[in-house]
Image: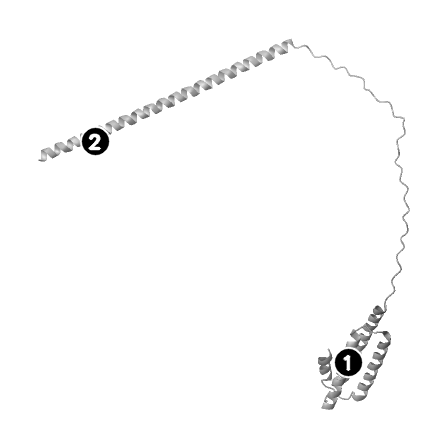
Amino acid sequence: MNESTEEKRLEEYKQEMDLLLQEKMAHVEELRLIHADINLMETTIKQAEEDRNRCLDNAKKIFFEKQSTEWNTEAPPEPNIPQPLNIPAPNTQPIPVPRNKPTERQPFRQQPPPMKTSAAITNGSSVVRLNDRVRSLKDKWADNYRQSATKDTKELSDLDKIKQELEILKQQTDKTKPVSEMDLMKKEIDDLKNVLGNRYGRGNRGRGRRNFRNNYY
């Protein structure tokens, strides 16, 4: 049994070695073919380079031979004779001088006369002056209120009436009115000023201005 198994293994080993040798020979043959192709390409390249160099040498020889023959057979160049210059005759015609065109007189444009100011514009300027007058009067009244320290209910009611009258005056001054009504408004404001000057003296000091400014400003 042992001998039979050994013989069997030896035969398998021989078969594997034979297969490996065959594969090796196949690879060697492929390498030989590859080297043969490489050698063939190298020889063709060398032959092409030699042919090219031979053609270049022949072209150079032919060029130099032709050039030498042309130099030997070429006639000497003729000397350049200066030709007379053709100078044109002077132009006797007068040079045209550009004339300035006569300046056209532009018609005088008369500006239109200024438009007359309408009554609304004059009334508006007078309303602005009246507003300034009312503002100055308010400052004076505020000084008078500042000097008074204590106020009773009757005085407060009078102040409410004055406040209403001032609001009416303010609304009237904001609108554009004829000049005649403005004179009436000025007269009413002067009357109010006199009434306030008579009612409130300058002996007291207090918070009158603060209340006045809170109400009217």
What residue lies at 35% left-to-right and 22% top-to-bottom? 36
Judged from this view, the residue extending furthest toward the left is 1
- The residue mark sitting in front, 2 or 1, is 1
Split into 4 quadrants, where in the image is the N terminus? top left
Residue type (three-letter) at the residue carrying disc 2 = Glu
Residue 22 visible, this angle: yes
- Residue 16 is left or right of residue 181, and the answer is left
Mark found first going from the N terminus, 2 or 1: 2
- Compared with 117, 93 (above or below) is above
Split into 4 quadrants, where in the image is the C terminus? bottom right
Q: CA distance from mark 2 to mark 1?
A: 132 Å
Residue 152 visible, this angle: no
The residue tagged 1 is 166
What's the colour scheme? one colour
The residue tagged 2 is 16
Is 195 or 78 nearer to us in this picture?
195
Judged from this view, the residue extending furthest toward the top is 73
| Quarter of the figure with residue 3 | top left
- Compared with 122, 158 (above or below) is below
Label 1: state its secondary structure: helix
What residue lies at 63% left-to-right and 11% top-to-bottom? 71
| Quarter of the figure with residue 69 | top right
Is 94 or 104 nearer to us in this picture?
104
Tell me where residue 143 appears, x and y as whole percent.
Answer: 77, 82
Tell me where residue 203 appears, x and y as whole percent.
Answer: 77, 89
What residue lies at 21% left-to-right and 30% top-to-bottom? 17
Mark 1 neighbour class, 10 Å CA radius: few under 14, some 14 to 19, many 20 or more = some
- Compared with 17, 47 (above or below) is above
What residue lies at 75% left-to-right and 82% top-to-bottom? 164
Residue type (three-letter) at the residue carrying disc 1 = Leu
